[in-house]
Image (cartoon, rainbow, N blue to C red):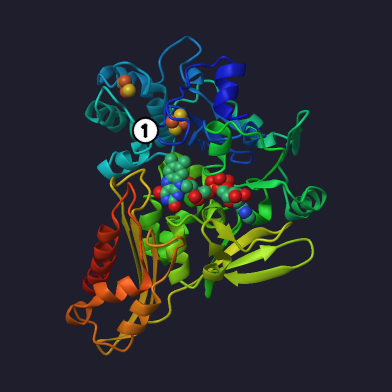
Amino acid sequence: MTVLDYLRGVRRLTGTKEGCAEGDCGACAIAVAQPGAGEQHYQAVNSCLMMLPQLDGASVLTVEGLAGKDGALHPVQQALVETDGTQCGFCTPGFVMAMFAFQQAGEKASDDAIHEALAGNLCRCTGYRPIVDACRKIAGKPAGFANVDLDALKQTKLDGEYSSEKERFFTPQNVETLLLVLRWLPDAVLLGGGTDLGLLVSKERKRLPAVIWTGQIRELKEIRDEPGALQLGGAVTYTEALPYLDKAFPSFGALVRRIGSRQIRNLGTIAGNIATASPIGDTLPCLIALEAKIALRSEKASREIPVEEFITGYRKIALNKGEFIASILIPRLGAGQQFFVYKLSKRFDQDISAVIAAFRVEIAGGRVKKLRAAYGGMAATPKRAAAVEAALTGKPWTQETLSNIDAVLAEDFTPMDDQRASAKYRLRAGANLLRRLQMEAS
Ligand SMILES: Cc1cc2nc3c(=O)[nH]c(=O)nc-3n(C[C@H](O)[C@H](O)[C@H](O)COP(=O)(O)OP(=O)(O)OC[C@H]3O[C@@H](n4cnc5c(N)ncnc54)[C@H](O)[C@@H]3O)c2cc1C
Ligand code: FES
Ligand code: FES
């Protein structure tokens, strides 16, 4: 059962709305602080994509919990009233929760920060200007925590397993327990943030007989910022990875800020993006261009495999039964190497790529010493542009060298027409991104 179905259907807390049931509109946003968070650390998430046991031990705030016990509006709600930031009101609870999370994180009233905080919420009638004004009004002000007992959150004891007649849900706390459950139920589905998998339940109304949530597995939450490589655990979310990516690969960090919305990034994991193996999965071209490897683990063995080899076909991966992604290892840039990634989509926010191109390039003496180029949206899988790499290596790093690059890219890819872009657009844009790279990396 999704958290949204539970809130509305079982608890009759109908303030939280269902707009799209697929993570796009933000009407279902709630604020969640995970166990151990302790401090005032609520994140806005989409309740339509979350499975109920993902709240194991967490503190949850819905819009009903924001007003004071005397009924006084929370400052965020008051700000929306004062700026006329609501009309039909359908989107308002979701905006309120996104703004509450923004306020309690102590973020600044900059346009960029407000834009990022609200990009996951759609309003069809008020228009965004008054809502943005409300957000600006509350930024930097202390957040009221009317009805929340944060000390209780620190002490919560977790259950580990939830079951009903036909369904079981496990929330292991360490890898040892994960391996035990996998030995017992090798066909159990691994759940990261649920931003891909959750759609099976919220949209297709499927029932999953056995689910193992990775979100509380200590070892899979680890991030190691080591000299040779950045190592991200198999349950690290986009939000958790962002500061490290920003530091090591700023262009990758900027791309991650365009994956879904903040509500999606608070839930979604990089391992989930890899395992979904979508031809337009945004992290995949980056990881391929950066020569990243995946550490896989099972009860019997551990192995490492390049991301490039892990993706074996359209939405197919080289994951054996009983195996899971333990971590992702991204080698740091060597001396002289630069990394750029470009995402083309119809909207800037909350949209999947029509074309995505990632490049790791090394220029020496005005020539291309080494280039790794990987594209998404151009074939059934994200993949390297081998002909382009070969054609450019050793050549002068100039726009002239790229004059015929469209034809070379066409040797690498035969893209298709779909609602996101035509094949012709994809090829032309893919080649032009190389021209953009030449300008930026010169
Ligand atoms: C509104 C919306 C916008 C989105 N926008 C983008 C976008 O801009 N770009 C983009 O690339 N994607 C986007 N996505 C897709 C999705 O958010 C990402 O693919 C995300 O990274 C999935 O991660 P997750 O943890 O939520 O995966 P889940 O849904 O939990 O799982 C996805 C798959 O990964 C497997 N899995 C999870 N963890 C492991 C593990 N440790 N080991 C082995 N298998 C594992 C699961 O079994 C499942 O098959 C969007 C989704 C939504 C709903
Ligand atoms: S109902 Fe639209 S994001 Fe959840
Ligand atoms: S107020 Fe009507 S959808 Fe936003």
Report whether 326 appears left or right of 315. right
Q: Residue at x 27, y 22 (%)?
A: 125
Residue 441 visible, this orientation: no
| Quadrant placement of the C terminus | bottom left
Residue lying furthest top in this view?
Answer: 70
Residue 123 visible, this orientation: yes
> Of 420 and 11, which appears nearest the observer?
420
Q: Is residue 432 above or below residue 370?
A: above
Quarter of the displayed picture in which ligand 3 can be seen: top left
Q: Position of residue 333 (x, y in %)?
A: 43, 75
Q: Is residue 232 above or below residue 71?
A: below
> Of 306 and 328, which appears nearest the observer?
306
Mark 1 packing: few (<14 Cα in 10 Å), some, or many (20+)?
many
Report whether 437 appears left or right of 376. left
Report whether 2 appears left or right of 398. right
Read off the residue under disc 1: 121
Rendered image quadrant of residue 159: top right
**Helix or strand or loop: what does disc 1 sit on?**
loop
| Quadrant placement of the N terminus | top right
> Of 38 and 169, which appears nearest the observer?
169
Q: Position of residue 237 (x, y in %)?
A: 53, 50
> Of 164 and 217, which appears nearest the observer?
164
Q: Does mark 1 have its CB less than 8 Å from ligand 2?
A: no
Q: What's the residue type where badge 1 is placed?
A: Asn
Q: Position of residue 223 (x, y in %)?
A: 57, 59
Q: Residue at x 28, y 54 (%)?
A: 422
